[in-house]
Image: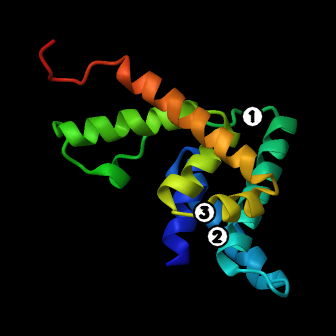
Amino acid sequence: MLLPGLRRFARSLTGNTYDADDLVQGTVERVLARGLPEQTELRRWTFRVCRNLWIDELRGRSVRSRHVVDSDQVDPESIGRDPGNVERRALEEAMRAMQRLPIEQREVLVMVAIEGMTYRETASVLDIPEGTVMSRLSRARAQLTSWLDTQPAEGMVQ
């Protein structure tokens, strides 16, 4: 199941469903047009292409002086429709907190914690040492825990 994982990763980078879908489409087009290098695992390669395309997009947006990412935007379609749902609100808060992380920490967190990639696979995709993956993941988890622990859950009596 390459595409669902790629879409989740793209969503973590872009912060919204529409840009994520465009990014996934661009990634698939690029991989199909240019092919897969020999001895390369498809999943790692597509994640790397996706990340590089997003970096290119951010650079282009910066040049055009446009807003890059709205970190408070949450797509209700991806997390449920019942606005009174406590789990939905908790997930929305977690998604907002993830979008606040620096991109380097967010991409490692998604690859390891959500996509289930090993540290070695993640390091290969991002072209960084495994120790850097572990360090970024640790900082991301600590920051998320800090942010989410400081906010009382809605509907909870203190």
- The residue lying toward the viewer, choosing from 14 and 91, is 91
Residue kind at label 3, given as amino acid type: Thr
Q: In the current view of this chain or complex, which residue is farthest to the front? A: 131
Separation of marks 2 and 3 at Cα, in angstroms: 25 Å
Vertical relation: 22 (above or below) 154? below
Q: Is residue 72 visible?
A: no
Name the residue that disc number 2 marks: 25
SS of the residue under disc 2: helix
Q: Quadrant of residue 46?
A: bottom right
Name the residue located 55 percent from the left edge and 44 percent from the top edge. 15
Q: Which mark is residue 66?
A: 1
Separation of marks 1 and 3 at Cα, in angstroms: 35 Å
Q: Position of residue 67 (x, y in %)?
A: 69, 32
In screen coordinates, is 36 left or right of 41? right
In screen coordinates, is 125 left or right of 145? right
Name the residue that disc number 3 marks: 118
Q: Which mark is residue 24?
A: none
SS of the residue under disc 1: loop
Q: In which quarter of the image is residue 36?
A: bottom right
Q: Residues within 10 Å of mark 1 (few under 14, many from 20)?
A: few
Q: Nearer the viewer, mark 2 or mark 3?
A: 3
Vertical relation: 38 (above or below) 61? below
Q: In which quarter of the image is residue 103?
A: top right
Name the residue located 27 percent from the left edge and 18 percent from the top edge. 152
Q: In the current view of this chain or complex, which residue is farthest to the right? A: 63
Residue kind at label 1, given as amino acid type: Arg
